Amino acid sequence: MINKERLLRDNRLCKAIIGLSVEELKNLAAEFSVCYLIYRKKNRKDHERQMGAGQKGFIPTPLDKLLFILLYLKCYPTYDLQGLLFGLDRTRVCRWVKILLPVL
């Protein structure tokens, strides 16, 4: 798993890993969070459950999702490597990439 707290403390490391400074990442994270929520509401199929109900995802927060997709775009790792870094199966990595790219 990627150590998000360490990444957010070290500006040089943040730029090396995802290509943005910590300040730029925090600004983008606020906008990304709103865009992700809009995307989820727009592409939601009719369900009986409310938003947020059910099993929690393996990439829990919008910031984690943003780090996931930014790392993918900067380094372009294989799905297997991305899965290893974020604790996911390669098929889930593929699904998340297809979901998060349009949001970004």
Image (cartoon, grey):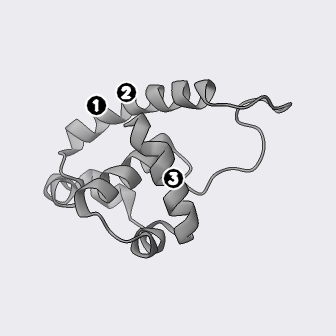
Secondary structure found at label 1: helix
- Decide if residue 81 is on the left or right side of residue 23: right
Give the number of the mark in front: 3 or 2. Answer: 3
Separation of residues labelled 1 and 3 (CA atoms): 22 Å
Q: Is residue 8 above or below residue 75?
A: above
**Outermost residue, right direction?**
48
Separation of residues labelled 3 and 2 (CA atoms): 18 Å
Question: What residue is pinned by disc 1?
Answer: 27
Q: Amino acid at mark 2?
A: Glu
Residue in view at x 36 percent, y 36 percent: 29
Contact check, label 1 and label 2, Cβ < 8 Å: yes
Looking at the picture, tell me which residue is in the foreground, 23 or 38: 38
Instruction: State the image coordinates of residue 64 (x, y, percent, origin top left).
Output: 45, 50
Q: Earlier in the sequence, mark 1 or mark 3?
A: 1
Instruction: State the image coordinates of residue 101 (x, y, percent, origin top left).
Output: 40, 43
Instruction: State the image coordinates of residue 47 (x, y, percent, origin top left).
Output: 81, 32
Give the number of the mark in front: 1 or 2. Answer: 2
Q: How many marks?
A: 3
- Decide if residue 2 is on the left or right side of residue 41: left
Disc number placed over residue 96 in the picture, else none: 3
Q: Amino acid at mark 3?
A: Trp
Question: What residue is pinned by disc 2?
Answer: 31
Q: Is residue 8 visible?
A: yes
Secondary structure found at label 2: helix
Secondary structure found at label 3: helix
Dot 3 crowding, Cα within 10 Å, few <14, some 14–19, many 20+ = some
Residue in view at x 27 percent, y 40 percent: 25
Dividing the picture into quadrants, the one containing residue 49 is top right
Instruction: State the image coordinates of residue 57 (x, y, percent, origin top left).
Output: 63, 52
- Decide if residue 49 is on the left or right side of residue 34: right
Q: Amino acid at mark 1?
A: Asn
